[in-house]
Image (cartoon, rainbow, N blue to C red):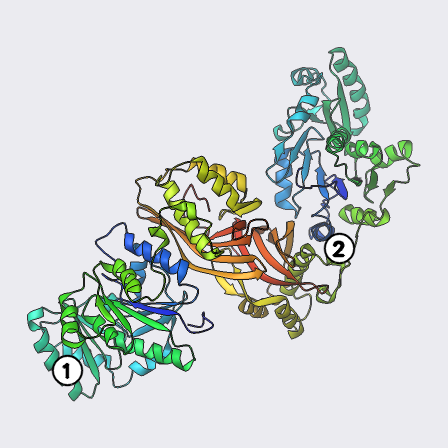
Amino acid sequence: MARLSAPARLMIVSDLDHTMVDHHDPENLSLLRFNALWEANYRHDSLLVFSTGRSKTLYKQLRKEKPMLTPDITIMSVGTEITYGDSMVLDDGWIEVLNQKWDRNIVTEETGKFSQLTPQPETEQRPHKVSFFVEKDKAQAVTKALSEVLEKRRLDVKIIYSGGIDLDILPQGAGKGQALAYLHKKFKTEGKLPLNTLVCGDSGNDAELFSIPDVHGVMVSNAQEELLQWHAENAKDNPKIIHATKRCAAGIIEAIGHFHLGPNLSPRDVADLLDSKPESVSPGYEVVKFYLFLERWRRAEFDNSEAYIKSLEADFDPSGVMVYPNGFEQSFSDSVSGLRNYHGDQQGKRFRVWVDRVFASQISSDTWLVKFNKWESYGEERNNCVISAILRSKGNSGFTWIHVHKTWVELPQGKD
Amino acid sequence: MDRLNGSARLMIVSDLDSTMVDHEDPEDVSLLRFNALWEAHYRHDSLLVFSTGRSPASYKQLRKEKPLLTPDIAVMSVGTEIAYGDAMLVDAGWEEILSRKWNRDIVVEETAKFPELIPQAEIDQRPAKVSFFVEKVNAQRIIDVLSERLEKRGLDIKIIYSSGTALDVLPRGAGKGQALAYLLKKLESDGKPPANTLVCGDSGNDTELFSIPEVYGVMVSNAQEELLQWHLENMKSNPKIIHATQRCTAGIIEAIGRFGLGPNVSPRDIMDFQKWNGENVNPVYEVVNFYLFYERWRCAQVQKSEHYLQKLKSMFYPLCSFIHPSGTEWSIHQCIDTMERLHGDRQGKQYKVWVDRVSSAQIGSGSWLVKCNKWESFGAERYCCLTTILISSKADVPNALVWLHMHQTWLDGPDVKHPDTWLF
């Protein structure tokens, strides 16, 4: 949270399943487009928040399956757990709020009396979340009866039905919306309320997000009936909430454009990377652009033309050195030249490269230190290294790479 | 060889066993002193050449046992193999020269006729070197007869007897001295002759080195009789060759001082870290000094004082980040806290820290990228990280440097076992 010294330009609060993550797209094209857009244009001055119904275990599981960025804040278990940063530090203040008029034992006791409620697996049961499966036609009745019973037992709870199957019982103060409101309040007291907030969702448990005052909102094109219904009943006339025409992450990008929240052209949408002149020439953009080029080169998405190698040679200082994660050192001239051998080596395969947590700091008037994580996935296998790079500005025409140093974070399983 | 843009200020050509390396010192005190001196003051503009009788395999073995720096050139197998740089690229031109009027099979055939010649181990037999053990009393006679026979067979060879036991049969053009002459010639034709050359040795196979014209030479205090004898007979009045009063590497440092070849006070000789941020803004010196301090801190050879902790904190930019070789990123606070905890944790454990191949490139006005191999050894274990450090001059304090960023990668790859505590 303390990473930004000024209010965030944009804070995106997005649901994961079927919003940021499209389970029907094994190539994850939109998600990768969003990733490139975020890292190139927003990471340095904006906040990325994931708000998911998943518990920590299932969230981590999803991270292994899908190419997701590292968010600044992760809100899990339907807004009952807030964690910060890469190391996922828990927000204790939020726990205190949730403890008000809540007693998990009473909840389990009372819900045990409803046969229509089937408990979800252990990983989904959390200190401030008791979760069940219940059929659509029975949901409303059970919710009503349960509310009454728990109120009689002096608890202040909220019951959320979502996805046409999930029923979560949370403290009244919990929920995706409440968690966001809590965050907004925290930022406000620090004088760092984000300039704009965009919430993104697809299902019932996201409804609360759209209720927060002053936020922009996008319901992705594939949003569920229950959310669209809620919108029709509660927020129909709110111009700040739209129903996107595109699925999942593509819908989020669409909304950024629609609401003019900032750049919405992902580097992945730019056909000829080496010739592009981005609106703002930044070291972060340069990094995103280069690794995108590498992915496309190895997938042979463009020809093995000398023009590309020549262009790269101009971008990499020949006296610069690449330190590989296995401890091997190579001059840039050799590395760039060696790229010729990699053209198309991943053609026809599910090879993807993306960067995460790209942070640039200026070291002198024209040089920058950029730190980031680089991921490569080969179908099921993936590897991750942390990279320090030094770039020198060429005025308005981009950057020259002077130095690259890599260390493995997650060891490659097999390939290099 | 091409690492330096111009002529080397100094080229040191040193034998290894009992010269650069003291097998009687398990702590390698002098060698580590030399290492720090070399990296801090010479690496950037001078050439380090090891010239050993050992074969490549045997040389590599020695490298695992002793804290040797990475030389610019390794001359092995008594001057019959020349290899350049970290990658040890073989000099094919030298191989070709040595192949003239040389036939290994003939040598093996003729030498087999002498029962007094006991073949050395396989590891020490090389394409241009056939090696034996022979007792001193038989040596001269055998050398004379063997030379005649091999000449009759049409070969042009030389026989070197060393350390009172080792006998090497080599092509005439080979030998430590010949190899050095070849290197000097090469450097000269590139327009880069070294300003000064210092040869260092202790035994018979080093005599040739001292014969090269114009070189400075030091016979370490523990030099063998055969070398001192040769010196007496051949070089007695050459003021450029001395017999040091100190053993092994200490003798080399002594010679640098005696001949005024450059700085001869090793950072390891300076105990007072008060002078840390010295008068000269020198990022390389800063790095060498820091790791020296680090070693002494973990051995509790410096006090755990508030003064030092403050100095440490002021050395790093507050937002300095350290990318640990495990792939995790540490804030400088985490580093300093850990540093505090590690005071004295290696006391009494033969713990040594040294840096190798330190290079510095200026990447902006007032900022440098320093790269080095950083080694730690304790007992039989040793570890190395390829380390890059971004250093900048402090805006408000003249002549002071601040560390902005550090990044390390295990040199031997991530799969090998690594120590539990690793910092910097």
Percent x, y for residue B306? 45, 35
Dots 1, 2 in contact, CB < 8 A = no
Q: CA distance from mark 1 to mark 2?
A: 78 Å
Q: Secondary structure at mark 2?
A: loop
* Residue beneath disc 2: A266
Percent x, y for residue B85? 40, 67
* Chain label for disc 2: A
B389 with respect to A91 (left or right) = left
Residue depth check, mark 1 versus mark 2: number of the one nearer the observer: 1
Query: Is residue B260 in view?
Result: yes
B358 with respect to A122 (left or right) = left
- Residue B68 is marked as none
Residue A257's place in the image compared with A184, above or below, is: below
Q: Amino acid at mark 1?
A: Ser
Residue B390's place in the image compared with A198, above or below, is: below
Instruction: Please tell me which residue lies in front, B3 or A332.
Output: B3
* Residue beneath disc 1: B147
